Image (cartoon, rainbow, N blue to C red):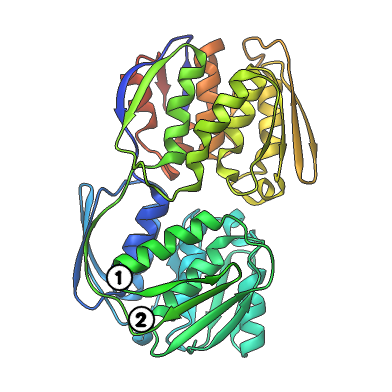
Amino acid sequence: MRVVIEKSLARGRVSAPPSKSMAHRLLIAAAYADGESLVRGISSCEDVLATIDCLRALGAKIEYDGDSARVRGFNFKNSAPSVPLPCRESGSTLRFLIPTALLSGNECIFSGAKRLIERPHGVYEDLCRERGFVFFSDGEKITVRGRLSAGEYYMRADVSSQFITGMLYALAALDGCSVIHLTTAVESRSYIDLTISALNTFGVKCGFADGKTLYVEGGGYEPREVCVEGDYSGTAFIESFNLFGGEVSVSGLSDVSLQGDRVYREYFKKLDSGFATLDIENSPDLGPILFTVAAAKHGARFTGTKRLKIKESDRAAVMAEELAKFGARLELSDNEVTVYKSELHPPTEPLSGHNDHRVVMSLAVLSSVYGGEILGFEAIKKSYPDFLRDIATLGIKVKIYET
C-alpha cells in the first residue's frame, strides 16, 4: 500500500487502540482456563489474530466476533496439533506458546515469517538442550518436542522478557510449584509485570519473590470475563502530533496501567524542551517515534538501543536511512543512537516502511509536517490496523493507493 500524507494538523479526540500486549496475555490465559471466558476489546491486528489461530490449532475453542472473543479452554497437556502453528510475524505468539507446546510431549511445529523464525530463540534452545528436549530450526520453521514438569528453572532475562512470559503460562498449568531463577539483568520488567497481572486475573498465584526470582503455584486457571485496556505504545504515535502543533486527546487509557511504554509522555516533554539523553532499554518499541521527534526538535542521545536490531526491522538502521531523506543525521553504535539537530525538509524520495509497523507510523507523523509518500503502509496491520482511519479522523490529509 502506498500512502501520501500532505502537510496538515491533527485536532480532535480518538480512542486508544487496544493493547496488543494485553490481548495476547488475556487470550492465552483464557485458553488455559477450565471453562468459558470472555475477552472484550480485542483489536483485529495481525499479531493478535496469529495468537488466536495458534490457540485454535492447539485445541482451544475460540469464537471471535467484532472486538470480543469467547474462549473455551483446553488441557494443552493433551495437545497434538497436526499442522504447523501459524505465527505470521508475531514474536509474542511464537515465544509465548513454545512452552505451551512443551506440555504434551508431542512434536509441535511453528511456522512464520522468515525474519521471525530467524530472531534469537537461544533461551529456549538452552532450556530444551538441558532437559533433553527437541528444539530445531531450519530457518523457515521451528520444531519442538518435550514434556515440561514443575520445578526449578534457570533462565536468561536479558534477551527478551517474552521467554519468561511463555514459561510462566506453561508452569501455571502444571501440578506443583515452580521457581524461575533469572540469571541476568531483566529486560523490560514491565512486560513481565503485565504477564503476572494477567495470570493473577485468571486465578493463578505467581509473582516476584525477589528481584531475580519468580514463583508459580501450579494448579491451573479459572475462567473470567475481562476487557483489554488501551495501548500506550500505539497511542504514542497519536499524541506525538501534539508536538507539531496538533491538539489531540485520547480516551481509553488506564491511569494505573503497568505498561512500560507509558513513559513516552515524560520522554516527549524532555525532547520538546531541548537536547535530552534517554534510556530506552526497557521501551524499545518507542525507539522509532522518539528518534523522529528528536530529529524534528533538538536532537537527543539514546542509550539501551541494542535490542532494536532484532525487531521487525533493524529499527535504528532503517530510521537513520529514512530520516536522512528529511535531512536528519543519526549516528549508530552497538547500544547507542545519537540524533543530531538538523534543518529538516520535505523528503527527497519516497519513504519505505521496511515492513515495520512502528517505522511506518513514525514516518507518517513526520510526513504530516513536511509531506511525504510512504511505501509499505500495510505494515500497520500488525499492531494498529485503524491507524490511518484514526489520523484521517483527526484531520491528517491522507491519500491511499493500493499497490
Visible residue check, residue 328: yes
Residues marked 2 and 1 touching at CB (< 8 Å): yes
- Examine the rendered structure and indicate whether residue 328 appears above or below residue 356: above
Across and down, in percent, residue 279 comes to 67, 41
Task: Assess disc 1: are there few (<14), some (14-19) or many (≥20) residues with their C-alpha within 10 Å of its C-alpha.
Answer: many
Task: Assess disc 2: are there few (<14), some (14-19) or many (≥20) residues with their C-alpha within 10 Å of its C-alpha.
Answer: many
Q: Earlier in the sequence, mark 2 or mark 1?
A: 1
Gap in Å between the C-alphas at discs 2 and 1?
Answer: 9 Å
Query: In percent of the image, x 46 and y 73: which residue is there?
Result: 168
Mark 1: secondary structure: helix
Across and down, in percent, residue 321 comes to 71, 29
Count of numbered circles on the image:
2
Q: Nearer the viewer, residue 96 or 105?
A: 96
Query: In percent of the image, x 52 and y 35: which residue is there?
Result: 264
Mark 2: secondary structure: helix
> Would residue 155 appear left or right of 382 to someone viewing this image?
right
Q: Which amino acid is tagged 1?
A: Ala
Q: Which amino acid is tagged 2?
A: Phe
- Examine the rendered structure and indicate whether residue 385 appears above or below residue 248: below
Across and down, in percent, residue 235 comes to 42, 34
Question: In the rendered image, which residue does mark 1 sit on?
Answer: 31
Visible residue check, residue 1: no
> Would residue 180 appear left or right of 302 to someone viewing this image?
left
Question: In the rendered image, which residue does mark 2 sit on?
Answer: 76
Query: In percent of the image, x 52 and y 39: which residue is there?
Result: 263
Q: Quadrant of residue 225?
A: bottom left
Label at residue 5: none
Query: In percent of the image, x 35 and y 24: which residue is there?
Result: 249
